[in-house]
Image: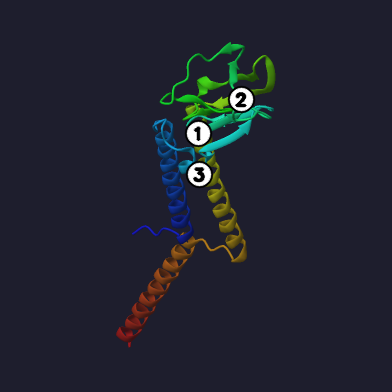
Amino acid sequence: MVHIDVKVKVMAFACFGLLVVALFDVLATSQARSASANVSATFTKYSTSLFYGSRIRFSYADKNVSAIAGQFHILECPNVNASNAVTWLIDGKDFGDFTPDARRYLEGAMLVFIPISAEDSGLYECFVGDKLFGTSKLTVQSKMEQHLFALMYYLVACALFAVLHAVYTTILCFQYPVIYIENAVAENLMDAYQTEFDDDLSSDSDSNTTSSN
């Protein structure tokens, strides 16, 4: 029966558990990506993901912003009253019509993405009339980048477990004398055979002596 060290078992279970968490994390983010646009942002604001962070992000259009595909993202035009009519441009072009059931829509001074996707990357500008109130470069990571990011964390964690196990085993090896079991067993067998052979010779010698007498 093969004996598996306890530390190896712990390392294997830890890696497996982290893999399960990563898979559930990916599935949960995929569900957020396919969620209905009518889902309330306040209902999902505490939804978090281990690898991907909070699934709802809020930012002002006065700085560069990064997001992950699948998140619910709100981009607000700064220093604008909710009653003002805000116009948004992406890369200098108008969005066109917004409807409440669309994946992205206007809500006062806010531009809401439910969810955001890699195609939403670009330079955003918000206007009230002809006056520019905010500019923001939005960069959205793709789904593949998310999964590679999660896989990287998983592999790094497993590699760390393996290194710690190897270091711990090496430390234990230097604490005790090295015994080569195969050689020790062979030497013991040789000693046993030699003793038996000597006993046989002694018995034969005694028999010959008795016969001569």
Q: Please state which of the two labelled residues, at mark 2 or mark 3, is closer to the viewer.
A: 2
The total of numbered circles placed on residues is: 3
Relative to 87, say whether 46 is above or below: below
Relative to 97, say whether 153 is above or below: below
Residue 28 horizontal side relative to residue 73, left or right: left
Q: Quadrant of the N terminus?
A: bottom left
Question: If you read the primary sequence from the N terminus, does the residue marked by circle 3 or circle 1 appear first?
Answer: 3
Provide the secondary structure element on which disc 1 rests. Answer: loop
Label 2 with label 3: CB-CB less than 8 Å: no
| Snapshot quadrant of residue 85 | top right
Residue, disc 2: 84
Please state the horizontal and vertical placement of residue 156, each as a whole percent of the image.
Answer: 55, 42
Please tell me which residue lies in front, 76 or 90: 76
Residue under the image location 54 percent in, 46 percent down: 157
Q: CA distance from mark 3 to mark 1?
A: 10 Å
| Snapshot quadrant of residue 102 | top left
* Numbered badge on residue 48: 3
Please state the horizontal and vertical placement of residue 137, each as a whole percent of the image.
Answer: 64, 22
Q: CA distance from mark 1 to mark 2?
A: 27 Å
Label 3 with label 1: CB-CB less than 8 Å: no
Residue situated furthest top in the rendering: 93
